[in-house]
């Protein structure tokens, strides 16, 4: 019994370390972008670089989900880490800014090779209760990685350069990838293969009797996909552009902007624990209703921020930073509901994995739009108008959440 507990912990620990490294190599460009603009890269091109990562990450989720069920998941993860490392090493040395776009697009696809295989490894080797806990641990590990990157990047830039952030991140991924494949191969070889349960077989049989589009229609999940796209725009848009917003709107040094942006992953971690704790409550046990409430809260945080961004004072910029952090925290909580919980509602139909892949793809469609969209709006109209556009996106998300509520409530009651 002790051996099984040790193996379970080892599996979760290795998945967490791998996902930690993947976030470290995924967020590098977004974190140092404020230091690269405009000396190294134009803002609109920077937006395209970030968009390329999100587009290929979103498309990669669909492909990776399929591959994760057919091929060895640990080998897919190993390949993802190595390719991501290569992209981080190549990006600082490409001869012009436009070549950064395809390099970072490849990184997006490589990053997509991590999450679906992690889900398969955890779900194949852990009970449902332990899987939920493991999912939380792995997710928090990713946010801890982001915090450390926000702290590490300005220090690295101060003593070396922005290029060193990419080089060291790439080297870190190579080391983690080698350690992961070696130890995970050893641990999984010690585990007995778990055969599909009778319930799972029955679920798969029922799934074949109902078309995917009919399932989407009767459960209201199609409109939830719209809410997820809005959430992805807000979550990743704020994370990617807040250092640049803080630097340009308040005239602060880029290293200070990057360092202060550590507030975002801190708030995100807190929000994930809070939303999980209250998920069983009356307001948030229905994900459509819960996401609607979170969109309303985000609007409430964005309204004062749109005024404060025009005021050059320590108090104004501090409050603006906190409000942006709170808005982003709401979106991470919304992500927990719509990405973490919604697919679980479809376990009875045997389509949880499929729904999960589509949900993740929608998230990064929104993220891709935000990268280039925020660059354009901030350039043309300024940062106050940009935050007002965030309010409009939250309103769209709210409309989609309301539209899905009736049908989705029927699913929840089932």
Image: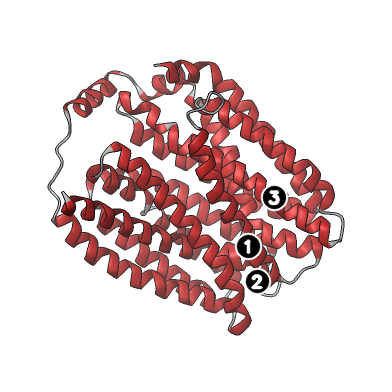
Q: Name which residue lies at 42% across and 60% down.
A: 20
Q: Name which residue lies at 26% across and 39% down.
A: 127
**Residue to which mark 1 is pinned:** 46
Instruction: Relative to 61, say whether 337 is above or below.
Output: above
Classify mark 3: helix, strand or loop. Answer: helix
Q: Earlier in the sequence, mark 1 or mark 2?
A: 2
**Residue to which mark 3 is pinned:** 324
| Mark 1, other Cα within 10 Å: few <14 / some 14–19 / many ≥20 | many
**In the displayed structure image, the side of residue 69 where residue 156 appears, left or right:** right
**Residue to which mark 2 is pinned:** 36
**In the displayed structure image, the side of residue 242 where residue 128 appears, left or right:** left
Labelled disc at residue 69: none
Kindly check if marks 1 and 2 are in contact, taking CB atoms under 8 A apart as contact. Answer: yes
**In the displayed structure image, the side of residue 132 where residue 167 appears, left or right:** right
- The reply to whether residue 243 is visible in this rendering is yes
Mark toward the viewer: 2 or 3: 3
Instruction: Relative to 17, say whether 306 is above or below.
Output: above
């Amino acid at each position: 019994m002790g051996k099984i507990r040790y193996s379970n912990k080892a599996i979760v620990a290795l998945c967490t370390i791998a996902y930690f490294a993947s976030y470290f190599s995924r967020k590098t460009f977004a974190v140092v972008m404020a230091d690269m603009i405009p000396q190294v890269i134009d803002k609109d091109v920077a937006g395209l670089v970030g968009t390329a990562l999100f587009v290929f990450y979103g498309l990669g989720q669909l492909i990776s989900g399929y591959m994760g069920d057919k091929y060895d998941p640990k080998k897919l993860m190993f390949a993802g880490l190595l390719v991501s490392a290569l992209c981080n090493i190549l990006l600082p040395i490409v001869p012009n800014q436009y070549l950064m776009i395809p390099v970072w697009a490849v990184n997006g696809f490589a990053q997509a090779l991590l999450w679906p295989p992690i889900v398969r490894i955890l779900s194949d080797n852990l009970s449902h209760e332990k899987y939920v806990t493991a999912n939380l641990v792995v997710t928090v590990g990713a946010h801890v990685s982001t915090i450390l990157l926000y702290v590490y990047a300005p220090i690295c830039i101060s003593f070396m350069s922005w290029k060193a952030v990419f080089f060291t991140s790439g080297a870190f991924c190579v080391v983690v990838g080698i350690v992961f494949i070696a130890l995970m191969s050893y641990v999984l070889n010690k585990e007995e293969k778990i055969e599909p349960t009778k319930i799972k077989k029955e679920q798969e049989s029922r799934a074949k009797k109902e078309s995917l589009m009919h399932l989407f229609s009767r459960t209201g999940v199609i409109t939830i996909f719209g809410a997820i796209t809005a959430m992805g725009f807000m979550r990743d848009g704020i994370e990617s552009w807040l250092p640049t917003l803080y630097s340009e709107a308040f005239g602060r040094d880029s290293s200070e902007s990057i360092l202060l942006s550590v507030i975002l992953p801190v708030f995100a971690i807190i929000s994930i624990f809070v939303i999980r704790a209250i998920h069983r409550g009356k307001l948030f046990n229905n994900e459509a209703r819960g996401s609607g409430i979170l969109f309303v809260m985000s609007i409430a945080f964005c309204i004062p921020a749109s005024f404060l961004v025009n005021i050059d004072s320590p108090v104004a910029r501090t409050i603006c930073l906190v409000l942006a952090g709170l808005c982003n925290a709401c979106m991470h909580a919304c992500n927990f509901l719509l990405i973490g919980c919604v697919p679980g509602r479809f376990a009875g139909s045997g389509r949880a994995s499929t729904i999960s892949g589509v949900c993740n793809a929608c998230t990064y469609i929104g993220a891709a739009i935000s990268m280039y969209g925020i660059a354009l709006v901030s350039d043309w109209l300024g940062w106050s108008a940009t935050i007002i556009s965030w309010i409009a996106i939250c309103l769209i998300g709210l409309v989609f959440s309301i539209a899905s509520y009736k049908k989705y409530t029927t699913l929840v009651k089932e």
